[in-house]
């Protein structure tokens, strides 16, 4: 028999030793669970393209959050749905909108036991579905930022702990930081969608948020899927402008980007396990093509292995409820 000094299989002998030497570990503290909130009462409406995900009215959202809190989910990301739409996205910063109402109810019910993050973007509030204000068919950067600042401030005033600009306008992180600080919300954090690609993986989200563009696409402001160095540049700009957390979106097809951004920042790094990634797994599992638990957890470990400190995932509830980790 060959004499082998190094036998890596010794540390793979059983679950106990494999767990002891595992290089990548997950914890509940890493996860953020997204929610879609709309006006009304007693609403819990299934989203067809995203099995297991729902539209909630603020009152039913409170009930659902009380359930996920018991599971250990204490960080949520809110998206507004179903507001009145116009060219200037005026409903995005109305203190009476669904997100503002939900924030107030959640904070009244749970206080600091829940950490609320709010998406800051105009696409669900514009009548054209783009993430900024239009001049003709051109998305205007600086005018859009003015509205994004109003939206972020409204969220902070309602009680949001962190705002998350996802619009990809140039300079919006610095402008939002200045606007929050000037209005004495220096403790409101910013998680920037720093490296957000113009991806086909967002398809199911379009149904969930009713935010599909009425013409064209978002390639003039979201990133080219072929680029990595550009993503590092975007992340560095947002860090310089005052972001507290950076994000790469999507996650699964961009593990290389997560890794390279992580190597070039000192900030915590989030990744967004987006709707298309989620729904593909759900669809394949329903057809018994895959083992859902094993695939989901392999993906989660891949995100962490690539360098993500924080994982935003629609799978979070299943992971905790079904005790997959």
Image: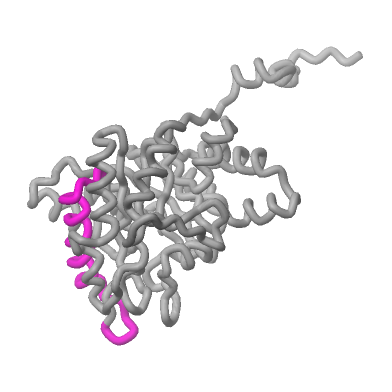
Residue at the spot x=56%, y=26% of the render? 23
**With 242 as the anchor, is 77 left or right in this view?**
right
Residue 86's spot in the image, x, y percent?
A: 27, 78
Query: Can residue 122 be found in the magenta stretch?
Result: no
Residue at the right extreme, as displayed = 1
| Numbered disc total | 0
Quarter holding the N terminus?
Answer: top right
Answer yes or no: is residue 212 visible: yes
Answer yes or no: is residue 229 visible: no
Q: Is residue 246 above or below residue 168?
A: above
Report which quarter residue 64 is drawn in.
top left
Report which quarter residue 174 is drawn in.
bottom left
Q: Is residue 99 above or below residue 316?
A: below
Residue at the spot x=19%, y=64% of the render? 94
**With 100 as the anchor, is 290 left or right in this view?**
right
Q: Nearer the viewer, residue 229 or 268?
A: 268
Give, as a single range, the part of the protein colored magenta.
Answer: 135-161
Residue at the front extreme, as displayed = 42
Q: Nearer the viewer, residue 239 or 79?
A: 79
Residue at the spot x=17%, y=40% of the render? 187
Residue 246's spot in the image, x, y percent?
A: 35, 47
Question: Which SS does the magenta portion mostly show?
Answer: helix
Quarter holding the C terminus?
Answer: top right
Residue 259's spot in the image, x, y percent?
A: 49, 43
Residue at the spot x=72%, y=18% of the render? 14
Residue 8's spot in the image, x, y percent?
A: 72, 20
**With 98 as the anchor, is 42 left or right in this view?**
right
């Amino acid at each position: 028999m060959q004499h082998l000094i190094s036998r890596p299989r010794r540390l793979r002998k059983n679950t106990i030793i494999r767990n002891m030497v595992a290089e990548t570990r997950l914890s509940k503290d890493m996860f953020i669970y997204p929610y879609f909130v709309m006006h009304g009462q007693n609403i819990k409406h299934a989203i067809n393209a995203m099995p297991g995900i729902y539209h909630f009215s603020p009152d039913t959202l409170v009930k659902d959050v009380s359930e996920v809190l018991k599971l250990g989910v204490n960080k949520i990301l809110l998206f507004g749905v179903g507001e009145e739409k116009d060219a200037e996205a005026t409903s995005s910063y109305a203190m009476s909108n669904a997100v503002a109402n939900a924030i107030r109810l959640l904070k009244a019910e749970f206080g600091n036991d829940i950490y609320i993050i709010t998406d800051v973007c105009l696409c669900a509030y514009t009548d054209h579905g783009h993430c900024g204000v239009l001049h003709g068919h051109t998305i205007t950067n600086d005018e859009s930022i003015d509205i994004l600042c109003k939206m972020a401030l409204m969220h902070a005033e309602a009680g949001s702990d962190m705002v998350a600009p996802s619009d990809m306008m140039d300079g919006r992180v610095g402008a939002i930081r200045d606007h929050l600080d000037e209005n004495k919300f220096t403790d409101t954090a910013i998680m920037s969608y720093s490296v957000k690609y113009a991806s086909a993986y967002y398809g199911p989200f379009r149904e969930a948020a009713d935010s599909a563009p009425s013409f064209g696409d978002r390639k003039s402001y979201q990133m080219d899927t072929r680029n990595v160095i550009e993503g590092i540049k975007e992340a560095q700009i947002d860090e310089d402008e005052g972001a507290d957390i950076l994000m790469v979106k999507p996650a699964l097809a961009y593990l290389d980007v997560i890794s390279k951004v992580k190597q070039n920042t000192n900030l915590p790094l989030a990744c967004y396990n987006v709707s298309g990634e989620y729904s593909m797994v759900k669809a394949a599992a329903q057809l018994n093509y895959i083992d859902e638990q094993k695939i989901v957890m392999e993906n989660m470990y891949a995100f962490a292995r690539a360098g993500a400190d924080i994982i935003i995932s629609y799978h979070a509830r299943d992971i905790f409820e079904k005790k997959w980790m």
